[in-house]
Amino acid sequence: MQIKTLRAKSIQEALQLIRTELGPDAAVLHTREVRRGLLGRMILSRRIEVTASNEVNVQPPLTLAAQNAVASQNAREQNAAQPTSSVDTLMQTPAPAHAEHHRDQLREDIQAEIQELRLLVEKLHRRSDSPISDASHPAPVKSDDPREQAFFTVFTEMRNAGLHEQDARDLLDAVRPDCGAADSAESIRCKVAETLASELLISGPLEVTPGKCTVAAFVGPTGVGKTTTIAKLAAVSRLHHKHRVGLITVDTYRIAAVEQLRTYANIIALPMEVVATPREMRQAIARMRDLDLVLIDTAGRSPQDDARLQELQSMLAEAHPDETMLVLSCVSSTENLQEASRRFAEVGVNRLVLTKLDEAVQLGAVLPALRGCQLPVSYLTDGQNVPDDIQEAEARFLADAVLGESFSTTQRSNAA
Ligand SMILES: Nc1nc2c(ncn2[C@@H]2O[C@H](COP(=O)(O)OP(=O)(O)OP(=O)(O)O)[C@@H](O)[C@H]2O)c(=O)[nH]1
Ligand SMILES: [Mg+2]
């Protein structure tokens, strides 16, 4: 017995193939529409599978010729009939009705899926509107109440600035008692910025008293901008304030590092010493004692590298720096900043320099590290230009930067 199963785009095409393969008297044993996902049906066309044989005689098997005749008859009689999704019905429905039916079916499927997606999006939106699990301090949510709506706007801006949910919530909770019904998002923003500014620790610049040698060492993870920051400070101190400045580098691990600092020292015309051991450090400091300011550059260290951190500590113990500046890049994640400040605390850091403000898309992630390390910030750097891209840290400026663009005082006054 010869049985064939064929697939085609339409029942007509399938029957034509069967006729060619098995002859006009072949009997159709089975038909079905090959199921595809919605995407498959949208991208690919429908497929009909037909199984037929030329040697069976079952009742009521219709030969192809008879089926074609029935199909034509049905086409005339049933063109107004409601189609069903079975292929048997498709076989009895004329071609334009097939297409119509197929389109209806597809439309219904798409509408059902859109409805499903809509429900899903609404659910997610509701969740993001109230992302707080702590019921005792709910986060601001979308509301018809203008005051709550203003809180929600500011909360969203802070989250967009990269602030962790808890930090954003705490800041809003802190200003809530001072906000009345008339407070707009603008005034809430202002209060939040003031609150954060009052909390941030700022140290002011390095204190340099001519005739009294101030020694400042710069430590931190690799590539955060220690050497560049030293070059900026040295240039400002020497060229603007006319201080007598000297440089020491202990970064003998990279030839390029020594050359990098030497280049700056040559340009600014500063004495520079390269030291490799604690003893050499002691001697170099002694030679520079009559200068106003000595800046010590160190090799970048991984906060995970216990041995190197220990080595750094021994070296700095000989220098007795007045200030030990931890240099951190704002491009780093909260976790990396926290880990770096925790590990470098062992080296005796007492101030912070935040670099690469210009590169950081958001500064919100810096806040937990600032709060965690409790080190006052001395300088902010925002570019590679020596000496221009450095400024003394200022609380309100830093608060605005951490809170995001919409908090920027400049932008607000421009917009007004
Ligand atoms: N965008 C930007 N780049 C900076 C800033 N500060 C430093 N850089 C760049 O960051 C790169 C690394 O700077 P370095 O000063 O060599 O960093 P380092 O901490 O001394 O690096 P190691 O000594 O290797 O640990 C250089 O390309 C600098 O130009 C900054 O504020 N913004
Ligand atoms: Mg360096």
Image (cartoon, grey):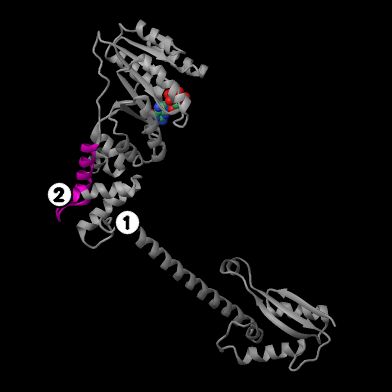
Q: Earlier in the sequence, mark 1 or mark 2?
A: 1
Residue closest to the eye, 277 or 63: 277
Residue 56: horizontal and vertical position, in percent?
Answer: 81, 88
Taking 178 as reference, is 350 left or right? right
Q: To which quarter of the image does residue 77 belong?
A: bottom right
Identify the residue shown where x is 38% and y is 37%.
338
Considering only vertical position in the picture, is 198 above or below 82? above
Task: Mark yes or no: residue 380 visible.
Answer: no
Residue 207: horizontal and vertical position, in percent?
Answer: 25, 18
Residue 355: horizontal and vertical position, in percent?
Answer: 37, 30
Q: To which quarter of the image does residue 88 belong?
A: bottom right
Q: Secondary structure at mark 1?
A: loop
Residue count near mark 1 (Cα–Cα under 10 Å), binned few <14, some 14–19, many ≥20: some
Q: Amino acid at mark 2?
A: Asp
Task: Mark yes or no: residue 170 visible.
Answer: yes
Taking 299 as reference, is 131 left or right? left
Q: Amino acid at mark 1?
A: Ile
Considering only vertical position in the picture, is 329 above or below 257? below
Point out the stretch of residues depicted in magenta: 174-199
Considering only vertical position in the picture, is 288 above or below 400? above
Taking 38 as reference, is 7 left or right? right
| Gap between marks 1 and 2 measured at Cα | 22 Å
- Residue 178 numbered tag: 2
Taking 319 as reference, is 51 left or right? right
